[in-house]
Image: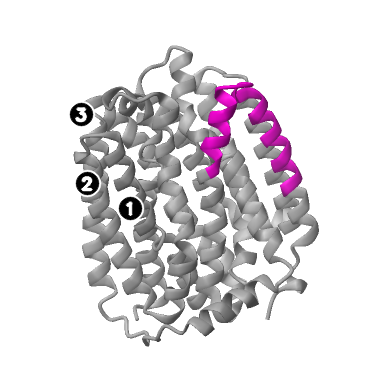
Amino acid sequence: MPGRNRTLNLLALVSFASSLFMRATDPAIPQIAAGLSVDASTAALLTTAYALPYAFIQPVLGALADVFNKARLMLLCLLLVSVATFVCGFAPRFDVLIGARMAAGIACGGVVPIAFAMVGDEIPFAERQVAMGRLLFAIMTGNLLGSTCAGIVSDLIGWRGVFFVNAGFGTLVLLLGVIGFRSDRSPRGHVDLGTMAGNYLSIFQNPLAKICFGAVFLEALFMYGCFPYVATMLHQAGETRASIAGIVIAGFGIGGALYSLSVSRLLRALGERRLMQTGGIVMGFCLCVIALRAFWPVEFVNFALLGFGFYMLHGVVQIYASELSQKARGSAMALHSFFFFLGQAIGPIVYGIGLNSIGLGPVLVFGGAVLVLVGFTCAQWLRKAAAAP
């Protein structure tokens, strides 16, 4: 296995590549809708098509990560997501596009969660917050460049080019990963259904599991759920350029990157409890600002603040999720991702219902209030002393 620092760098690179795929469609939703003759709320379901299978594959991939070689499984998943994304670029109809996007979501489900599980295996708990912060920096940079580049590419050569560029870069990173992990000699396990069931049971026996998983589900539902509608809201305000929607969404990545660079200082200054409380308050405020439909530069700054606040809370919750079961860390992180992406899958549906009934504003304000409550609940209940065996 490569040295610890080299391993972390490789995991950050692979996580960066996979994060490019996650928000690739958001800035181009109006263009995709026009190109394939569907309405915007239907095109926004591409996020659900990606996130829902991503969520439901997590228990399977998490169990496999605990019995097979994590690095090789992660790279196999990156190969499959790159192939599926190439297919997205050639899709002649919306049903083909959504099917290929679902396949990409299934494959991508084995990249970032396994990367976090490998960090948990390699890095001691006392150093893990900073190590995971480096992975979060890579992921947020990928989200930042992914949404920005998706908007620019969509404006320049069309929405199909977004998929081709992402798939090509994913293939390049795959080759680098194969070379980098070639010395990995981690032992192989064997599939034992009894062990899988016992691992998941041990996770849910931890009283912190319902707090960690419930928190990330609600975060994703009310925060990420509005992302596919950003371009639509900008269109309604007269801003039709996909590149501007990409820049606004990229603000979230900038905020996340700033958090990852300052996480050590924030922990010393605030401590975990106030970090989670502040994160919930900031997210609630930012959702209310989105409801005001401000001019796009204001929205860009607001999304940057939203990303910063999100990771103030989410970064701490993720650490506790990695300790829910030390003997089945891959399974624990898979469940963490399952609930997180289940929220991302349901979120666009909830906001779509709001768009077609009471409007997005009331849903955003309600979601903001929920996220404030989530921050205070996590601050109250998550404690190191309650860590699982």
**Magenta segment, principal secondary structure?**
helix
The residue singled out by tag 3 in the image is 157
The mark that comes first in sequence, 2 or 1, is 2
Residue 273 position in % (x across, y down): 75, 56
Toward the viewer: 83 or 91? Answer: 91
Between marks 3 and 2, how big is the CA–CA gap? 17 Å
Are there few (<14), some (14-19), or many (20+) residues within 10 Å of tag 3? Answer: few
Residue marked by disc 1: 103
Q: Secondary structure at mark 3?
A: helix
Q: Are marks 2 and 1 in contact (CB under 8 Å)?
A: yes
Question: Residue 122 placed where, x, y %?
Answer: 48, 77
Tell which tag, 1 or 3, sits nearer the viewer: 1
Of the two numbered discs 3 and 2 on the same chain, state the one appearing first in sequence: 2
**Nearest to the observer: residue 280 or residue 260:** 280
| 355 in the magenta segment | yes
Q: Residues within 10 Å of mark 1 (few under 14, many from 20)?
A: many
| Residue 143 showing in the rendered view | yes
Q: Residue shown at 65%/66% (left/top)?
A: 320
**Circles 1, 3 touching at the beta carbon (< 8 Å):** no
Report the residue that reaches farthest toward the front.
95
Q: Residue at 76% x, 66% y: name it.
A: 383
- The residue drawn where x is 36% and y is 54% is 18
- Residue 94 in the image: above or below residue 102: above
Magenta residue span: 346-374
| Amino acid type for the residue under numbered disc 2 | Val
Numbered label attached to residue 87: 2
Q: Based on the displayed image, in which of its 4 quarters is residue 328 positioned?
A: bottom right
Asked which quadrant contains residue 32, the reply is: top left
x then y, percent, for residue 291: 62, 23
Please state the horizontal and vertical placement of residue 162, each as a whole percent of the image.
Answer: 27, 38
Q: Secondary structure at mark 2?
A: helix
**What's the residue type where badge 3 is placed?**
Ile
